[in-house]
Image: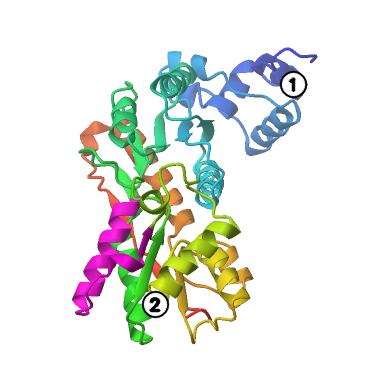
């Protein structure tokens, strides 16, 4: 076939069937007028796969049909959460008969607009947005997506604007699960460690931490609250923690602050544990550590890390399900299907670090 795109007529010739039969199998055209046996349909699909056939989405839409493609806008940060989300969104979309178009871009308005234009030109049936976390750009990005002209949109985690379709977790509850557990283990001076409160989850995690301490009649102590952007400035690398910085955290909250437990995300918790062990602290006897994320590192390090599972895979899967329900409702608005936002239940995974 050379470098030219494979056409349905090419598949029809190879399968020795009519073009109408190929259209029925691959695009669902022809209605009840066209009948194709199960064996013929399978032969057509097999040849289409062998020839690497890709459907003409524009033609499908001109014919009044869905493109069967969903767009996913996500930031380019190589985080564990993003990796799990992308994998599960792709898997669930395929299970439900949809293709995915993933676009990664930084939060500058012109770049986000380019992504939106690409989604529109490709005729996506809807968008999942995982791109509204950036500090000082939460509402701007969310509003750009909502005003894009694409009517079916689902956010992963609640955006900071009034919008009803999202799937996420209750981050205040995440902190509550961890802090309750540490207090049950007899810990009273629990440090809260985070790079910044500027991202969407940060203020909620912090509020959950403060409220849970108060629930147990423990007065919060600012000396063992370690926020990177407040302690060392805005230039802190948000998603990484080097050994030197981990040493500073230990000096500040354990040595000076006398903390007997630390709550941080999994990767930071693991790095802090390394420093503590280098200094001969026994975990959890001298100091307990709890994380959030339940990433692979939490089970690889020793002692294994107690952590709150943020259910990245379930959140992503539910977001796809919600989006496709919105797409289906757009086709049949008379059904009046009520679709609600959803918070997925997180769970505490108790391991050796507490």
Q: Residues within 10 Å of mark 2 (few under 14, many from 20)?
A: some
Left or right: where 350 falls relative to 205: right
* Residue 304 in picture, x, y percent from top left: 57, 75
Q: Quadrant of residue 324?
A: top left
Where disc 2 sits, the SS reads loop
Q: Is residue 209 above or below residue 244?
A: below
Q: Is residue 287 above or below residue 6?
A: below
The answer to the question of whether label 2 and label 1 lie on touching residues, with beta carbons closer than 8 A, is no
* Residue 25 in picture, x, y percent from top left: 59, 29
* Residue 85 in picture, x, y percent from top left: 50, 48
Residue at image x 47%, y 26%? 32
Q: How many marks?
A: 2
Magenta segment boundaries in residue numbering: 201-226
Q: Which residue is mark 2?
A: 258
Where disc 1 sits, the SS reads loop
Residue at image x 50%, y 51%? 81
Q: Which mark is residue 16?
A: 1
Magenta span includes 253: no
Residue 181 in view, yes or no: yes
Left or right: where 302 falls relative to 214: right
Left or right: where 301 falls relative to 112: right
Judging depth in this view, the residue of 4 and 196 nearest the camera is 196
Q: Of helix, strand and loop, which mostly describes the magenta segment?
A: helix
Judging depth in this view, the residue of 85 and 321 nearest the camera is 85
Residue 348 in view, yes or no: no
For the N terminus, give its image quadrant: top right
Q: Residues within 10 Å of mark 1 (few under 14, many from 20)?
A: few
């Amino acid at each position: 076939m050379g470098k030219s795109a494979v056409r349905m007529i090419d598949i029809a010739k190879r399968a020795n069937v009519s073009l109408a039969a190929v259209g029925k199998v691959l695009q669902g055209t022809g209605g009840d007028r066209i009948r194709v046996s199960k064996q013929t349909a399978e032969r057509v699909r097999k040849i289409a796969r062998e020839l690497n056939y890709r459907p003409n989405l524009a033609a499908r839409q001109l014919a009044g049909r869905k493109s069967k493609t969903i767009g996913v806008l996500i930031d380019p940060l190589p985080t564990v959460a993003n990796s799990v989300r992308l994998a599960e969104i792709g898997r669930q979309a395929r299970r439900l008969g949809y293709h995915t178009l993933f676009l990664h871009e930084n939060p500058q308005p012109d770049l986000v607009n380019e992504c939106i234009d690409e989604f529109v030109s490709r005729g996506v049936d809807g968008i999942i947005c995982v791109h509204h976390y950036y500090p000082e750009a939460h509402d701007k990005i969310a509003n750009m997506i909502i005003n894009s002209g694409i009517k079916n949109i689902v956010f992963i985690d609640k955006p900071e604007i009034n919008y009803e379709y999202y799937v996420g977790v209750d981050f205040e509850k995440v902190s509550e699960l961890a802090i309750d557990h540490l207090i049950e283990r007899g810990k009273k001076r629990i440090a809260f460690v985070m790079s910044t409160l500027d991202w969407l989850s940060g203020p909620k995690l912090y509020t959950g931490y403060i409220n849970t301490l108060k629930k147990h009649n423990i007065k919060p102590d600012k000396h063992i609250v370690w926020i990177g952007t407040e302690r060392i400035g805005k230039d802190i690398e948000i998603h990484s923690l080097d050994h030197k910085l981990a040493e500073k955290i230990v000096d500040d909250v354990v040595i000076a602050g006398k903390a007997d437990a630390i709550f941080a995300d999994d990767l930071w918790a693991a790095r802090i544990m390394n420093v503590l062990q280098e200094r001969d602290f026994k975990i959890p006897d001298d100091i307990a550590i709890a994380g959030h994320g339940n990433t692979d590192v939490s089970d690889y390090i020793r002692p294994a890390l107690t952590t709150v599972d943020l259910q990245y895979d379930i959140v992503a899967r539910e977001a796809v399900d919600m989006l496709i329900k919105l797409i289906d409702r757009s086709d049949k608005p008379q059904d009046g299907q009520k679709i609600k936002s959803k918070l997925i239940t997180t769970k505490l995974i108790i391991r050796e670090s507490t």
